[in-house]
Image (cartoon, rainbow, N blue to C red):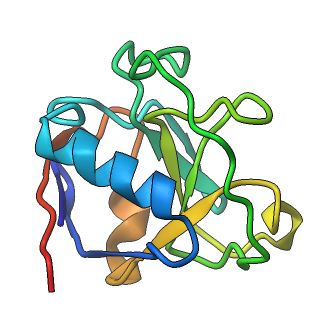
């Protein structure tokens, strides 16, 4: 559950598709890394991006993950790892606000927001209050 100042979002992770990204996201969530971090980039009809502790898109956890690119379609609600090139993802992630096939296969897709009807509430400055993994 991704809890923000603009609402709560139920996320389903895809560990079979992106095991490293999923483990990393859960680890950062459980250690409170995302708590208090704001969405720093929102492009209506495209993406909402968060996970930068600096708040400007330049920060991360101090390490990089290898890409786990898959043929996943970037539909509304898909969550992907933001990166600055091959094998540079760390903590920043983006949520698709609409479907965009041009991203297919270019980033690590690792999950999906299940209650997409509220995604358009996210704005620059929306704060992550916490991410609580719900294991089912």
Residue 46 vertical placement versus 36 (above, below):
below
Q: Return the residue nearer the eye: 78 or 126.
A: 78
Give the quarter of the figure containing the N terminus: bottom left
The residue lying at 43 percent from left, 35 percent from top is: 91
Q: Residue at x 51, y 78 (%)?
A: 16
Q: Quadrant of the C terminus?
A: bottom left
Residue 6 position within the rendered picture, expressed as x and y whole percent measured from the top left: 21, 55
Residue drawn at (40%, 45%), measured in percent from left and top? Answer: 123
- Where is residue 61, by image quadrant? top left
How many badges with numbers are in the image? 0
Front one among 123 and 134:
134
Q: Nearer the viewer, residue 57 or 108?
A: 108
Q: Is residue 11 left or right of residue 41?
A: left
- Residue sitting at 74 percent across and 70 percent down? 70
- Relative to residue 134, is residue 127 depicted above or below? above
Residue 18 percent coordinates (x, y) = 55, 65
On the image, the x and y values in percent for residue 134 come to: 12, 73
Q: Determine which quarter of the picture holds residue 84.
A: top right
Q: Nearer the viewer, residue 131 or 45?
A: 131
- Residue 63 in the image: x percent, y percent? 49, 22
Residue 93 located left or right of residue 39: right
């Amino acid at each position: 559950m991704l809890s923000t100042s603009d609402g709560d979002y139920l996320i389903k992770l895809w560990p079979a598709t992106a095991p490293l990204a999923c483990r990393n996201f859960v680890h950062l969530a459980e250690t409170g890394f995302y708590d208090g971090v704001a969405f720093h980039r929102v492009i209506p009809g495209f993406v909402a991006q968060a996970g930068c502790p600096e708040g400007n898109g330049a920060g991360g956890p101090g390490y990089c993950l290898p890409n786990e690119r898959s043929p996943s379609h970037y539909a509304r609600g898909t969550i992907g790892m933001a990166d600055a090139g091959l094998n540079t993802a760390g903590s920043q992630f983006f949520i698709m606000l609409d479907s965009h096939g041009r991203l297919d296969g270019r980033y690590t897709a690792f999950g999906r927001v299940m209650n997409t009807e509220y995604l358009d509430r996210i704005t620059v400055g929306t704060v992550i209050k916490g991410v609580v993994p719900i294991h089912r």
